[in-house]
Amino acid sequence: MFSVTSEPLSIEEISNKVVRPEAGAVVTFTGTVREFTKGKRTLYLTYEAYASMAEKQLKRIGDEIKERWPDAMTAISHRTGKLGISDIAVVIAVSTPHRKDAYEANEYAIERIKEIVPIWKKEKWEDGEEWIGDQLEKSAGIPEKEEIR
Amino acid sequence: MFSVTSEPLSIEEISNKVVRPEAGAVVTFTGTVREFTKGKRTLYLTYEAYASMAEKQLKRIGDEIKERWPDAMTAISHRTGKLGISDIAVVIAVSTPHRKDAYEANEYAIERIKEIVPIWKKEKWEDGEEWIGDQLEKSAGIPEKEEIR
Amino acid sequence: MIKVNCFAHLKELAGGNHIHIDKKELTVKELLEEVQRQYHIQTDSVLVAINEEYAFPDDQITEYDTVALIPPVSGG
Amino acid sequence: MIKVNCFAHLKELAGGNHIHIDKKELTVKELLEEVQRQYHIQTDSVLVAINEEYAFPDDQITEYDTVALIPPVSGG
């Protein structure tokens, strides 16, 4: 249900993992490579993961969702390697009996991915490249204990 | 981008309609047939639509989303006919440059579908069948003008 | 004569895809009263669509319009 | 000797997938100080994972642990 892979991701396949008779709603989130960020054109991205730990952290996000939304079922896949514009970097699928929970739990998942899952992206522009993350204000300093475990 | 069809729906296909270089996020909602509703087992559902008007109303929901979230792009397909447990009744895909808007606009779409799109479902249980809608408290009486157009 | 399309449980009550009201012109409100009187169909929560758009009680209907009765919807 | 896995820009700064710290045991806090001293890598916003779990500054690391430096993540 939780994987880090260099293969292309299929929304249908990841969504199908959480379809079940008790669930009437499936919400998926797909993160794709955007061409322009703050006016700057991206040529491609490279994602690198600490794969074994990243899968554990994804599973942990699934557990956190289960605690908060006991009826929810979650599947997450994140891709690594070189991705072009509009390629899919991550797919999150959450099914629940009632739709409100599926939206909330799904949004929770993507926010947690951006906080705790050891995956990094390098942006390649026409005039250079850079690993993203270190520049972020919110990441400065060691996070509070509650945030990371 | 807005269709009512008796053919099976593909999440991938509907999601692909809204993928574009400017969008980094796609949120899809899939409504599937749930086996149990309030403890009662559903055998199958039949959806009937006033198809030509329903497609106009779906397009109108797309327009409403465009007004509220100008960067959003929306595609919606609703299926008609007989559907078994876990079959997909509706798929909504919304892409936006930033993810928060995609979740919000998508949730707005499903709520509006349940208010204004002329599609009806008949539930078939072991001990009978019934058209759904007329029983709903919130549907009693003629809606306010603002709600319907 | 005005042809009125029916859907879902109204279709079952009407016994077919449409009913006819023997008028050349009337308002939405009058149409619903006629449906109730002639077909004994409860129309309290029924809306009317004229040419595939929701109509208001005072809107006029002629025999050249496409008219439909819209019971509370339950799609999604 | 403790082997420390490096990722993303830390890998580029370290010039390889891992670096070595010549100790049998030390705390997370001490490890980060050693990395900064020996490799001149700024570690203010770097976390440490021990056996694939985030660790706290006072946690002990031995040479039998799997250790990694985790710069601010940017997945999703």
Image (cartoon, coloured by chain):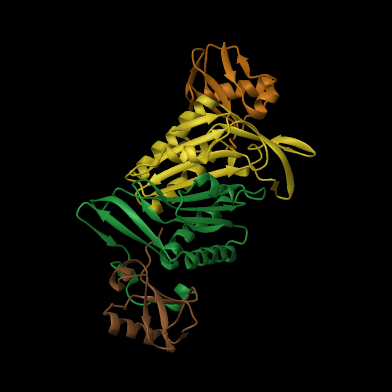
Chain colours: A yellow, B green, C brown, D orange
Residue for point 42% across, 82% down: C2
Q: Is residue B107 above or below residue C53?
A: above
In this view, the residue farthest toward the left is B127
Q: Position of residue A24 (x, y in %)?
A: 36, 50
Whether residue A34 appears in this view of the structure is yes
Q: Is residue B5 above or below residue A126?
A: below
Considering depth in this image, is C8 or B143 the residue closer to the camera? C8
Could you tell whether B13 is left or right of B143 in the image?
Answer: right
Could you tell whether B79 is left or right of B36 in the image?
Answer: right
Considering depth in this image, is D19 or A110 the residue closer to the camera? A110
Residue for point 55% across, 25% down: D29
Considering depth in this image, is B99 or A97 the residue closer to the camera? A97
Q: Quadrant of the N terminus of chain A?
A: top left
Q: Quadrant of the C terminus of chain A?
A: top left
Would you identify the image quadrant in which residue C56 lies? bottom left
Could you tell whether A14 is left or right of B71 in the image?
Answer: left
Q: Position of residue C28 (x, y in %)?
A: 41, 84
Would you identify the image quadrant in which residue A128 lies? top right
Q: Position of residue A120 (x, y in %)?
A: 61, 33
Q: Position of residue A145 (x, y in %)?
A: 46, 36
Whether residue D40 appears in this view of the structure is no
Q: How many numbered marks, from 0 up?
A: 0
Considering depth in this image, is A70 or B110 the residue closer to the camera? B110
Q: Is residue C58 above or below residue A11?
A: below
